[in-house]
Amino acid sequence: MMASAKVVALRALNGRSPLCNGLFRGFRLNSTVSVRAYSANMSPPSKAVVYEQHGSPDQVTRLIELPPVEIKENDICVKMLAAPINPSDINRIEGCVYPVRPPLPAVGGYEGVGEVQSLGSAVKGLSPGDWVIPSPPSFGTWQTYVVKEESVWHKINKDVPLEFASTVTVNPLTALLMLEDFVKLNSGDAIVQNGSTSIVGQCIIQLAKLRGIHSINIIRDRAGAEDVKEKLKQLGADEVFTESQLEVKNVKSLLGALPEPALGFNCVGGNSASLILKFLRQGGTMVTYGGMAKKPITVSTSSFIFKDLTLRGFWLQKLMNSEKSQECRVMIDYLLGLMRDGKLKYEMELAPFDNFPVALDKALGKLGSHPKQILKF
Amino acid sequence: MMASAKVVALRALNGRSPLCNGLFRGFRLNSTVSVRAYSANMSPPSKAVVYEQHGSPDQVTRLIELPPVEIKENDICVKMLAAPINPSDINRIEGCVYPVRPPLPAVGGYEGVGEVQSLGSAVKGLSPGDWVIPSPPSFGTWQTYVVKEESVWHKINKDVPLEFASTVTVNPLTALLMLEDFVKLNSGDAIVQNGSTSIVGQCIIQLAKLRGIHSINIIRDRAGAEDVKEKLKQLGADEVFTESQLEVKNVKSLLGALPEPALGFNCVGGNSASLILKFLRQGGTMVTYGGMAKKPITVSTSSFIFKDLTLRGFWLQKLMNSEKSQECRVMIDYLLGLMRDGKLKYEMELAPFDNFPVALDKALGKLGSHPKQILKF
């Protein structure tokens, strides 16, 4: 009885919004399939990274084959080409951070790029061979075939390297939305950020530079910090400081000719967030989008009253599922254009999907320092 | 040489914006007075609470007589009638909190009400006997005669008790601006605040009630807490909790039928600010306008990212010296009307100006619990 229920549930994992009602639809689907097994338009079986409970990703994920699912009249069956392992994917599998999680069992992954394999009978806007990304991104991209409704898929040009197409949404779009949505910045203004070596951080540096906006970047103290600074400056960073360099009475004395920043981005928390607050100008805004240090943000009363700072947060998942979702697709096309032209870049490492456990270990930092891992199907 | 400079400086204290250039104007004034001592329109000498250095107010303030000053063509000489001792006045004398302070020596006090005594030759909008308040409020109301330009003074109706007229700006206007400027609230919405027994807190309760907005109030644990709760409920509070009552896993379970608040006001900091954050609804805003606990505000990363909270600050002094100053005068008239009609009230105690040291000790809490002290001239 239990085993049978699990098989049915796993069927549902092959696409079809497991977020909302995957298990329920799985049961329905099962009975439907048995009645019209020969008439239905079916997907191929899908090889998928599945987890049945939350925990350490290297303990709870398994690479298994999911059975075919029906491709309904408005569905697209997409053959995945590439999908990244993002830190947020790890957090979701761990299950202790994100308030919105797919029901278990679930397929890992949240973004990626694929090629249209086959169409439901009512699909008009896409053709086999088109490249598509899920936009808004959605759960379950770590599998070879994904079946979801046409509206989920955004067609993109094929002139972008696969690894960039597969990663355009979660990190680069976060960087662009944060630069544009909180404070009206003009050429000549400045921003400050921590976690500057992250992909979002690198995208912020490059997107700011393209707009004539100066970036002041904070990195944690580490071996090879000078090399990291040089690399970020080659991307367009105006200043890069290690946290220990900022243990001075007045950090603003380090700004030289740069203006005091009006906007700050925090993905670390703790003392690193406080450094951003010190840099911000009167009336400035700090946006928190991550908490890598797992420490809260501490703010003095006078920062609010006399310095008039505003503190806010950013969550891509909520924003992209709002009325901004169409606007986001336009921004994604803009970002893909920059990637095609070599104006927006970051390091990645392609990993064969069948070697998922090794790629995961690299993403978890268990095998030393590696660039972002991109699963190639 | 030093003594002479001090006398000249003290002359300047009798009004005339010591904030910006009081000492400089003092020097000019001195030479002018000596040249045309008989032709000039002069104020009476002014009895004033003066401090020549920052420190504990009961140590550094003195009640002295300042010499007459010239009433220039656009000036008004106002005979002060009443002025409160606000906590912010204490902070300014202590000198360790406020970034904008009058140059020393300075006259204490920042708001109050007076009666027009005499006019400069070019004044058109005011007549002797009119009641006026400085708006924006300005330094130096703890003295018997204040000379400032006509534009500083806002004429008010005489149908309001003196003590209310003297206190309308700093606390009630703060309450009204905070209710109106940050989040669009509708009848049926809710706010949450700490420091609810403060005058601002009591005004927020009453102004919210008038708008059909529910108030959730946090007070510190104290003897007689039940009496305090009852008093605040009589003012219109929907709920009043002591901090220890809120040591529960889910504070929202205490809300009953009240909606989750969209807006919170923090004048305490530390744990009391965290309680406000717990009450706020998804996407809510907390405004900090004081820090009575002298402890910072600590916020989790997830409060920003997933709960989408916004944290801001409020500083009356900055706002009233902005383009909103005229709008503030309209709001002051509205508040005075509510006071006249008994719809906005709080406890005060009148204190003869000559007994300033006793009133100050009461304001400092050295003589047990007393209502706000209002100096009566």
Image: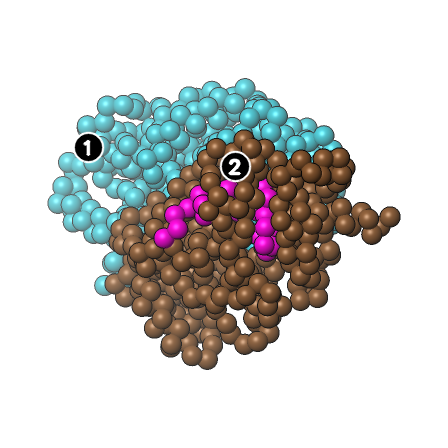
Chain colours: A brown, B cyan
Q: Which residues are magenta?
A: A130-159
- Comparing marks 2 and 1, which lies closer to the viewer? 2
Mark 2: secondary structure: helix
Q: Which residue is mark 2?
A: A151
The residue that appears at 19% across and 28% down in the rendered structure is B121
- Under circle 1, the secondary element is loop
Q: Is residue A302 magenta?
A: no
Determine if marks 2 and 1 fall on one subunit: no
Residue holding disc 1: B73
Q: Chain of mark 1?
A: B
Residue farthest to the left?
A: B35
- Residue B47 position in % (x across, y down): 38, 43
Residue B330 x %, y %: 40, 25
Is the residue B173 above or below the residue A116 in the image? Answer: above
Instruction: Spot the residue most to the right.
Output: A1
Whether residue A144 appears in magenta in the rendering, the answer is yes
> What residue appears at the point 22 percent right and 39 percent down from the top-left corner?
B70
Q: Position of residue A49 (x, y in %)?
A: 64, 58
Please report, as a chain letter, where disc 2 is located.
A
Q: Amino acid at mark 2?
A: Ser
Mark 2 vs mark 1, CA separation in Å? 73 Å
